[in-house]
Image (spheres, grey):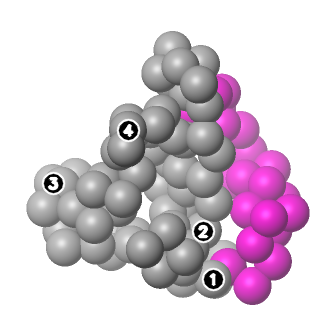
Amino acid sequence: MKQPCVYILASKLNGTLYVGVTSDLMRRIWAHKHDLIDGFSKKYAVHDLVWYEQHQEMRTAIQREKHIKSWKRAWKIELIEQLNPAWSDLYNDLL
């Protein structure tokens, strides 16, 4: 099932962060984990899904992604830790 989502990946606890948007979270995270997406997440081994947020429309998901990308790192960490204080990889919870 396709559902617009904004997500944050991390390389490790308090590691490198990547903010993205997708219409198919499972497929997209699987692709990140298998380094099928060239770019930042592949280069810096950013593979753990530590936060995500579902949206009704892709337009609002894209707006939210852009907004979060403009945030300071500390704000992104606070957002992650509100939902996932242990920085667990949430991908397996989606399976």
Instruction: Name the amino acid type tagged 2.
Output: Val
Mark seen at residue 38: 3
Q: Is residue 31 left or right of residue 67?
A: left
Query: On the rendered image, what quadrant is the N terminus found in?
Result: top left
Say above or below: 57 vs 19. above
Q: Between disc 2 and disc 1, whose residue precedes?
A: 2
* Chief secondary structure of the magenta portion: helix
Q: Nearer the viewer, residue 28 or 80?
A: 28
- Bounds of the magenta span? 63-87
Instruction: Name the amino acid type tagged 3.
Output: Asp
Q: Is residue 13 left or right of residue 74?
A: left
Badge 2 marks a residue whose secondary structure is: strand
Image coordinates for residue 35, horizontal then vertical, percent? 18, 68
Taking the magenta stretch, the answer to whether it contains residue 79 is: yes
Label 4, residues with CA under 10 Å away: few <14, some 14-19, many ≥20:
few
Mark seen at residue 62: none
Return the residue at label 1. 88
C-alpha gap between disc 2 and disc 1: 6 Å
Q: Are marks 2 and 1 in contact (CB under 8 Å)?
A: yes
Mark seen at residue 2: 4
C-alpha gap between disc 1 and disc 4: 24 Å
Q: Between disc 3 and disc 4, whose residue precedes?
A: 4
Q: Between disc 2 and disc 4, whose residue precedes?
A: 4
C-alpha gap between disc 1 and disc 3: 24 Å
Return the residue at label 2. 50
